[in-house]
Image: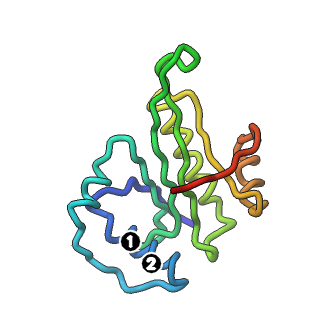
Amino acid sequence: MNYIIEKIDVNNYSLFDDMVFWREHGNEREPSQIVISEQMKNELSNPDLYVYAVKVDSRYVGWISCVYIAKIGSRWNGHGHIYVDELWVEPSFRGNGFAKALLKKADELKDELNATGIRLYVNVNNPIAQKLYEACGYVEDGRAIFMEK
């Protein structure tokens, strides 16, 4: 299956938003041309935010959202980490290597930014994702409790 990976910006955000709608509602909608709010433009212009989507034909079918977080201290020598915040592929497109391709994009970003490494969290109730990350070279490095406020 032919595909490309594109970085999301204000020019292709409408197509990205269509994919988010697909994820949230379980069905596709007609391509839209939404008006992008100033807040969304600000988020998209954040220099530490990197969102990439897999495009098949004329629609996005998966994405990865990464954030660069600077680290200080002699242990990191001024090199931060890439955090994978979210990785998703539309279920009917899984098994085509798209998640691995998106994780490879995170690897490329790490090299481009000279980051120390890549970190991510995976739900312990999601063994399929755990196997994906292991197949891409990630190893468990302790247990964490995810908290939010």
Q: Position of residue 68 (x, y in %)?
A: 45, 38
Position of residue 82 relative to residue 7, above or below, is: above
Which quadrant is the N terminus positioned in?
bottom right
Q: Residues within 10 Å of mark 2 (few under 14, many from 20)?
A: some
Q: Quadrant of residue 97?
A: bottom right
Q: Residues within 10 Å of mark 1 (few under 14, many from 20)?
A: some
Residue depicted at x 63% and y 77%: 92
Q: Secondary structure at mark 1?
A: helix
Residues tagged 1 and 2 counted as in contact (Cβ below 8 A): yes
Position of residue 16 relative to residue 133, above or below, is: below
Q: Position of residue 36 (x, y in %)?
A: 24, 67
Residue depicted at x 38% and y 71%: 17
Q: Amino acid at mark 1?
A: Asp
Q: Quadrant of residue 38?
A: bottom left
Total marks placed = 2
Position of residue 29 relative to residue 95, above or below, is: below
Viewer-side residue, 141 vs 35:
141
**Residue tagged 1:** 17
Viewer-side residue, 145 vs 52:
145
Q: Amino acid at mark 2?
A: Phe
**Residue tagged 2:** 21
Q: Position of residue 63 (x, y in %)?
A: 50, 60
